Amino acid sequence: MLKRYKIKNYDFKLIFMILALSAIGCFAIGSAEPSLQSRQLLGVAAGTVVMVFISFFDYSYLLKLYWLMYLGNLGLLALVFTSLGDSRGIAQRWVEIGNFRFQPSETAKILLILFFAQFIMKYKEKLNTFPMVIACIVLVGVPWYAIWEQPDLSTSIMVIVLFCIIMFAGGISYKLVAGVLAVAIPAVVVVIALALSPDENFVNTHLKDYQLNRILAFRDPDQYADDEAYQQLNSVTAIASGQLDGKGYRNNEVTSVKNGNFLSESQTDFIFAVIGEEFGFKGSVAVVVLLMGIALECMSVARKSKDLAGTIIAAGMGGLVGFQGFVNIGVATFLLPNTGLPLPFVSYGLTSLMSLYIGMGFVLNVRLQAGRQPVAA
């Protein structure tokens, strides 16, 4: 499993961007919630060690456990609905064992990428057959439903996007893609129209009240300025007030949105607002550039991969960082309705952070094995 690699094939550029983004996150969390900064720093340190360790393991061997990964994923998601499940507000998305608390839906993203990387490579000749497409939909549908029921609408949407990226990277036929889009696009339009309509039966059956209100707040923020739109309006104010250079790290200005406690959960969902206010446009652009750089580097690794499984792993991780970053920043700038997706490598959350580092460890190994074959130890 362990192999000897040439140092020139190691993707130091990707590691630099990951650590740079994580460092910005640690600084921002230190300002948003100082008591959590040390834990985030510990998470970054542990994540880096785990990422480097995994990067030297041949992913081809690890992926042989793909069914164990899938079943383990289902088991972790099922724990949420047991006595070990821990709720926050109206959502039950965490598992708490003693002092250890984690969010299985975050690990689910990585485990699904790894599972489908091996599954699709094993059955790649049958990928464009109807039975195989149905099988893939069923396999992703089971964990998706468990996430949906927590309820976690944002992560369930993220799982669907990831599945589409995985299938595309796996080589699904463009004819099938066109057929799915021909059905999916009108369906999405109908769902959005129904969500915005006064049809109470649809709302009660498919959407929670808070989910509907978030969509309505996006459409008419003035009407919901004191409720669902409150966080996003304050987030936009914070980002705008930072102007070009920002107000300074841990500033004591009384006009600060963060200092006035107008942003709850500023260390997680709205960490980008803290960055915009304290580091200004320059700091915000730095975060966007790093996120884009990581996503594009993963796509570059996907193109160089020695096999289909490596392509899916790298493309999946690139899509995860890129899309999730886009959604989080879109929420913070009020370009999208409010969701609960964290900003990759920046938001506080050790489960999300460790999961991303583990995924990137696999990407680094894909890059190491691309091109010249390693010499066995």
Image (tube, rainbow, N blue to C red):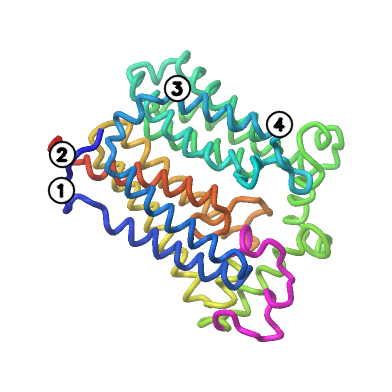
77 shown above or below 138: below
Q: Residue at x 73, y 72 (%)?
A: 261
Q: Which mark is residue 6?
A: 1
Q: Are marks 2 and 1 in contact (CB under 8 Å)?
A: yes
Say whether disc 3 or disc 2 marks the residue closer to the N-terminus: 3
Which residue is identified by label 4? Answer: 81
Residue at mark 4 to residue at mark 2: CA–CA distance: 44 Å
- Around disc 4, counting alpha carbons within 10 Å, would you say few (fewer than 14), some (14 to 19), or many (20 or more)? some
Residue 34: x and y in percent read 61, 70
- Around disc 1, counting alpha carbons within 10 Å, would you say few (fewer than 14), some (14 to 19), or many (20 or more)? few
- Around disc 2, counting alpha carbons within 10 Å, would you say few (fewer than 14), some (14 to 19), or many (20 or more)? some
Q: Residue at x 29, y 48 (%)?
A: 300
Which residue is identified by label 3? Answer: 67
* Helix, strand or loop for disc 1: loop
125 shown above or below 245: above
Which stretch is magenta? 248-271
The type of residue carrying mark 2 is: Pro
Relative side of 85 to 56, left or right = right
Is 269 within the magenta?
yes
- Around disc 3, counting alpha carbons within 10 Å, would you say few (fewer than 14), some (14 to 19), or many (20 or more)? some
* Helix, strand or loop for disc 3: helix
Residue at mark 2 to residue at mark 1: CA–CA distance: 7 Å
Say whether disc 1 or disc 4 marks the residue closer to the N-terminus: 1
Residue at mark 4 to residue at mark 3: CA–CA distance: 22 Å
271 shown above or below 316: below
The type of residue carrying mark 1 is: Lys
Residue 16: x and y in percent read 33, 62
Q: Residue at x 43, y 28 (%)?
A: 116
Q: Nearer the viewer, residue 259 or 145?
A: 259
Which residue is identified by label 2? Answer: 374
